[in-house]
Image (spheres, grey):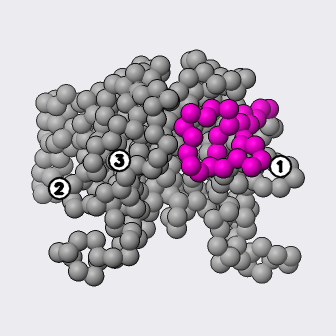
Amino acid sequence: MTKTRAAVSVGLFLVVAYAAASLPYAQVVPRQALDANGAPQYRVDPFWPKPLPNRWSMQQVTGMFVEQKTDHVWFLNRGAAALPIELTAEGDPSPALCCVRGPELIEADQEGNVVQAWGGPGPAYPKWPTALQTVVVDSKGFVWISGEANQDSILKFTHDGKLVWDFDHRPPAGAKATPENNQETSYLFNKGRFQVDEVANELYIINQKRLLVYDASTGAYKRGWGGHGMPLSEVSNKDIPGYTWTGGPPPEEKNFVPNLHFVEISKDRRVYIGERGQNRIQVFTTEGKWLQDINVSPNSPAQRGECGGLNTGKPALPSVPGLFTRSICGTTYKMVISKDPEQKYLFVADAHNDVIWIIERQSGKTLGHFSSKGRLAGQIVFPNAIGTDSHGNIFVGEVDTGKRIQKFAPVLAGAR
């Protein structure tokens, strides 16, 4: 090692050591490097995952879950988003080397190899969701899958793909999704975003401007609430007013602001609900008592009101003539909680800025972010799925034209 390289390495170590010793944050895994603000550091693994077998095409990764027992990564591979040019090998005889439509649920091991894959539209899965959104694997190995279409529901499968339960609650014939009815709980038009609470054997479903809780065995409705803990009877059935983005946050709103994009539950029984329409995470007890608002890049244009007026086809600001925007707005797309014993951090996928925000969980303080917009290794395009394993690795899935998963590994102090 040259003297110059040695000096750089020592300098890096000193900065990391100072950050770890002087800030009230700690690593997700032992020896993880922190930046000057206390944010844990990550580096992309460009060789994860391995190419899919059988000439399968990688498609939009709309949902992801890291299984607790094995650290295997389960992800939804939404085949409905495939373009004809991506399936040029389909046919008999096959006219190209790659690719064909593959199964829509894939399990990968820690090395990125496919362990098993199943699911997708067809006779074998007559109730398979048409607009795939969420996958959850519980501690007993059951796999829960949902979709966003009106007649999609939440399905519970065995580990190898046998359907064992259908949550149902599909809308009856003739029922209409608009105007909203946030007081109706017997059926739901969109059950795509949910979470399984094994502690209480409950399903948490975010829908319209509310969170609903159902028994995870019988499907019986148990309780629900709106923004800041308001009872369902007070939840507005009107659209939340839009706003004109001028560089600041959206107006305050007590109701949940659609679209609600995730619900997660921590080990200390806090419920986190992401509002893409408000760049906000609301935190509750499991009984619906509001505890905290966490703002995530609040000055970014929120989805509310068509990206704060940026999607109108008109110049967004008089000072920026000719600016036309088709932006993906809102900063709270998906979230995962770190798996260290204290669950110190929230990692939030932001598809407007194409970054992963790192937030100190207890205080709600934003410490920093990693990644950037782009298609190179370590950059991301429309992150809409995120997971983490017991080794502190973070996995990010992309939709729209991104259509890939990337693994971000912890950077260890002193590593080069």
What residue lies at 81% left-to-right and 38% top-to-bottom? Answer: 162
Pointer 3: what residue? 278
Badge 1 local density, few (<14 within 10 Å), some, or many (20+)? few
Q: Which residues are magenta?
A: 164-189
Check disc 1 and report its element: helix, strand or loop.
Answer: loop
Residue 29: x and y in percent read: 36, 32
Residue 212: x and y in percent read: 56, 30
Q: CA distance from mark 2 to mark 3?
A: 46 Å
First in residue order: circle 2 vs circle 3:
2
Q: Nearer the viewer, residue 180 or 146?
A: 180
Amino acid type indicated by mark 1: Pro
Q: Compared with residue 251, is residue 268 higher up or lower down, i.e. above or below?
A: above
Mark 2 vs mark 3: in front: 3
Quadrant of the rendered image containing residue 294: top left
What residue lies at 75% left-to-right and 43% top-to-bottom? Answer: 172
Pointer 1: what residue? 126
